[in-house]
Image (tube, rainbow, N blue to C red):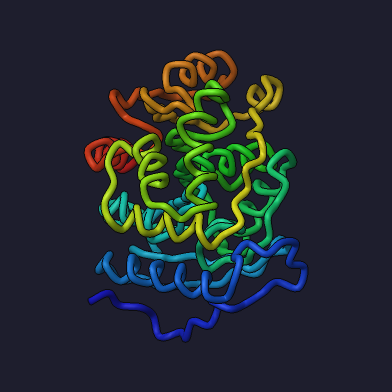
Amino acid sequence: MPKKNSTKYQAINHQSKNEKSMFFKSKEGKEKIITLYNQKLNDLNVEYSEKLVETKFGVTNVIITGDTKKAPLILIHGTGGCAPQILDSFPNLASNYCVYAVDVLAQPNKSAENRLDMKSLDYGKWLIEVIIKLRLKDVTLVGFSYGGLISLKALEFNETPIRQVFLIAPVYIVNGNPLLSLWKMFIPLKRFIKTNNQKHIEKVMGVLFTEYDDFALNFMSTTFQYCNMDFSPLPVISKTSAKNIKTPITIFAAEKDIMFPGKKMIKRAKAIFPSLKETVLLEDSKHVPNTKSFKIIEDLVSKN
């Protein structure tokens, strides 16, 4: 059974004083999400603690696992995800690092519901504030999907506490064909939200995931049914901002990712990031890699 520290956790219903938007559509929906969240966290079967970090952008929940004397690594999940899910994708990182899995604001998790402006540096300012409040230095960042955008925003704002960055199918470098994404993903998604018909969400999962299990399907279905998701156009980093980044960056791009095409991403990354250390094309991978690909990523992160 997983072990948790003795500090009593009371964050589930905590609301920030400057709450900007209600992410959960109802109390019932939030309870369903938190139940699934705790299920996944318990299934990890690891020793962990949960810490609430007060930031000016909203209260942030962080799951901590591993020896706190080891080098710090921060995991940042993507849209529609939560900290236990990304911890599940990297079961061995805590052998080499003290891992801090952050619940991103305005996502199906235990952090505040404040949705920040992704065109500004707010998500970067938020993450740096979390790092400072945790008193971490020489941090390794691992950002998946939207977590990649957050990682890059942090580098744009203040690179000082960050040692290196690993980006997995990140948002913010390139975008795919909008018509293809609309037809294959967003139309079925909108149909699912309207009808709650499982066949529509299964189409979306088939486009997004290289492989997925029952929990992923259940969590995504519940998220899109009970949460107000942001479907705003996704920005891309400017050449000027990218050239100012000095921190070593490694990018794992997914070959069959229709939203952020792998080969296109690697080509632009090589052109705009002077600090680019390495690129890896995950062959036959859709946006969410499979277990084999996550193991490749985990091994490379552990070696560094």
Rendered location of residue 206, percent (x, y): 34, 38
Name the foreground residue: 78 vs 204: 204
Q: Residue at x 27, y 36 (%)?
A: 293
Q: Quadrant of the C terminus?
A: top left
| Left or right: where 281 falls relative to 34 | left
Residue 238 against residue 156 in the figure, above or below:
above
Which of the 4 image quadrants contains residue 133?
A: bottom right
Q: Residue at x 47, y 35 (%)?
A: 185
| Left or right: where 286 falls relative to 124 | left
Looking at the image, can residue 249 be seen?
A: yes
| Left or right: where 29 falls relative to 278 | right
Tag count: 0
Q: Quadrant of the N terminus?
A: bottom left
Q: Residue at x 31, y 50 (%)?
A: 90
Rendered location of residue 125, percent (x, y): 69, 50
Rendered location of residue 139, percent (x, y): 50, 48
Name the foreground residue: 63 vs 249: 63
Rendered location of residue 181, percent (x, y): 51, 29
Which of the 4 image quadrants contains residue 272?
A: top right
Which of the 4 image quadrants contains residue 20?
A: bottom right
Looking at the image, can residue 164 be seen?
A: no
